[in-house]
Image (tube, rainbow, N blue to C red):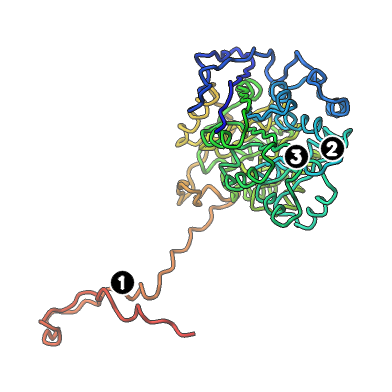
């Protein structure tokens, strides 16, 4: 069984958050080396390590040229601490928050170390199609001056089209676990040349049920491979997976809590459930943000809000897991090209949204998991850029807001709009029920409430069985016709009708 070595904690200085010490360091359950925790020297700056340049990390010139083309001068704190051990061939278990440059942290070492003449040398697994496409795009952009190329495997695209691309022999394969296993079983892909395997956002892959696919993939790749786990959180499940499949890994925890505390201006707005869509429309019309991401809990809400806003003159696009892959790709490309202003998304589909220029994030539904909140608002603070996050909170959701504040260790101030007038609950209003069942607040903005659902259909046999007997006058009943003179008052519990089958 593999043991984890000394844990390195890299935490930028922040006035509201003291640097970790050996006494306050996070302890990993069951880690025999946890008592040897030694904190790294804090790096000045919130996101970037301004004491280093990419050239100081030992990257080859063609890779450095790609960094220059992308406007990268100094590595982020995450990149400065991830890149050296990955380039040295070490297995790495890395934790870093969203928006800290994790893709380049493992992508640049791959571009630096792979052989141009050997296909399928590196495998990068991602939880969603959008994130896989985004990773491929970024690696190819950084490696434009190198002979190393990446391609994407994901469900929703024709198998033969992806098989034809595999024949070209890309050195880096980026994909979702399910499609990677599918292409492997079909014989279009092999793991014979794999040198490095990277699992990005391991926490989310485990959450959505890829554990078995991950296990099969890791067990079929060469034993001498390099393995890198990258995650926003490290749960006991991830620790267990790491102990099984990583060899003497270096564990790096980049505690970049300042990303959400100082880089994003956060506010909450108290609003009744039935007024949330009116408030959303009011904000978009009065604030006119440049590029807004709106997050909803339900896929149904995503479609309804995008449609309702577009009908009212604010062109909006939806993206969620039930959309056809071609349409999702089109929406994402428009987002990257700057061709849309408002995107309404579900949490899972948002995993590949990593673009510049997102100015506002609106949490139409505050998530029950505060980690999801952190991920959402990080969409508007990419690589150190600032942003604004608004969260709608109903009177019943105060505890969810408190959970968020406890996680980020900061108070989220309330924002009032005096010119927005709350309305009374519509007639027949029903509060939203657990599990996402429809309530009166999920209709299109400004439209009348949806009619109540029809009563459930009752089985014809059940109707007969539950039918009460007609009342009879006691003086007109001939009791001699009933056994023992007992007159029945309801149907018997078992009848032959239950055994009949309707003929066709």
The x, y position of residue 239, in whole percent, is 55, 33
SS state under label 2: loop
The residue singled out by tag 2 in the image is 148
Which quadrant does the N terminus fall into?
A: top right
Q: Do callouts 3 and 1 mark residues in contact (Cβ within 8 Å)?
A: no
Q: Which mark is residue 466?
A: 1
Q: Indicate which disc, 2 or 1, sits on the residue closer to the N terminus.
A: 2
The x, y position of residue 214, in whole percent, is 62, 44
The x, y position of residue 117, in whole percent, is 86, 40
| Residue plotted at (53% across, 55% down) | 450
| Residue plotted at (44% across, 82% down) | 502
Q: Residues within 10 Å of mark 3 (few under 14, many from 20)?
A: many
- Whether residue 309 is visible to the viewer of this picture, yes or no, is no
Q: Foreground residue, 69 or 409?
A: 69
Q: Indicate which disc, 3 or 2, sits on the residue closer to the N terminus.
A: 3
Mark toward the viewer: 2 or 1: 2
Q: Is residue 211 left or right of residue 284?
A: left
Q: Quadrant of residue 255?
A: top right
Q: Residues within 10 Å of mark 1 (few under 14, many from 20)?
A: few
Q: Is residue 41 left or right of residue 34?
A: right
Q: Do callouts 3 and 2 mark residues in contact (Cβ within 8 Å)?
A: no
How far apart marks 2 and 1 lie (CA) works out to 73 Å
The residue singled out by tag 3 in the image is 122
Q: Do callouts 2 and 1 mark residues in contact (Cβ within 8 Å)?
A: no
Q: Residues within 10 Å of mark 2 (few under 14, many from 20)?
A: many
| Residue plotted at (57% across, 51% down) | 443
């Amino acid at each position: 069984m593999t043991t984890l070595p000394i844990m390195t904690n890299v935490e930028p200085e922040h006035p509201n958050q003291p640097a970790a010490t050996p006494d306050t360091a996070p302890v990993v359950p069951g880690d025999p080396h946890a008592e040897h925790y030694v904190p790294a020297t804090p790096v000045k700056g919130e996101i970037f390590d301004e004491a280093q340049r990419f050239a100081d990390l030992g990257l080859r010139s063609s890779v450095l040229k790609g960094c220059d083309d992308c406007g990268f001068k100094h590595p982020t704190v995450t990149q400065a601490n991830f890149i050296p051990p990955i380039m040295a061939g070490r297995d790495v278990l890395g934790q870093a928050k969203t928006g800290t440059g994790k893709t380049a942290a493992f992508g640049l070492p791959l571009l630096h170390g792979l052989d141009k003449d050997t296909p399928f040398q590196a495998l990068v697994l991602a939880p969603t199609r959008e994130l896989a496409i985004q990773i491929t795009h970024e690696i190819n952009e950084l490696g434009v001056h190198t002979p190393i190329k990446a391609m994407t495997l994901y469900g929703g695209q024709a198998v033969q089209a992806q098989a034809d691309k595999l024949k070209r022999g890309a050195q880096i394969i980026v994909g979702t676990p399910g499609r990677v296993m599918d292409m492997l079983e079909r014989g279009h892909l092999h793991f014979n040349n794999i040198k490095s395997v990277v699992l990005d956002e391991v926490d989310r892959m485990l959450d959505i049920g890829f554990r078995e696919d991950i296990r099969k993939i890791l067990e079929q790749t060469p034993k001498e491979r390099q393995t890198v786990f990258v995650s926003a959180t490290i749960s006991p499940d991830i620790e267990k997976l790491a102990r099984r499949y990583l060899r003497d890994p270096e564990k790096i925890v980049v505690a970049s809590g300042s990303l959400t505390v100082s880089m994003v201006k956060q506010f909450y707005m108290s609003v009744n459930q039935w007024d949330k869509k009116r408030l959303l429309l009011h904000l978009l019309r009065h604030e006119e943000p440049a590029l807004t991401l709106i997050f909803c809990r339900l896929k149904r809400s995503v479609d309804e809000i995008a449609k309702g806003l577009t009908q009212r003159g604010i062109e909006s696009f939806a993206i969620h897991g039930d959309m056809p892959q071609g349409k999702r790709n089109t929406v994402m490309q428009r987002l990257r090209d700057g061709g849309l202003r408002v995107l309404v998304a579900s949490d899972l589909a948002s995993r590949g949204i990593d673009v510049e220029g997102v100015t506002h994030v609106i949490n139409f539904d505050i998530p029950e998991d505060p980690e999801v909140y952190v991920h959402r608002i990080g969409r508007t603070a990419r690589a150190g850029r600032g942003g604004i996050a608004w969260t709608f909170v109903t009177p019943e959701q105060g505890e969810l807001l408190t959970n968020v504040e406890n996680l980020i260790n900061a108070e989220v101030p309330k924002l009032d709009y005096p010119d927005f007038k709350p309305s009374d609950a519509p007639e027949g209003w029903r509060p939203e029920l657990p599990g996402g069942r429809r309530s009166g607040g999920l209709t299109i903005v400004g439209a009348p409430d949806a009619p109540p659902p029809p009563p459930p259909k009752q089985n014809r046999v059940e109707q007969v069985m539950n039918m009460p007997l007609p009342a009879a006058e006691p003086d007109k009943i001939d009791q001699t016709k009933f056994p023992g003179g007992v007159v029945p008052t309801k149907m018997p519990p078992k009848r032959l009708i239950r055994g009949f089958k309707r003929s066709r």
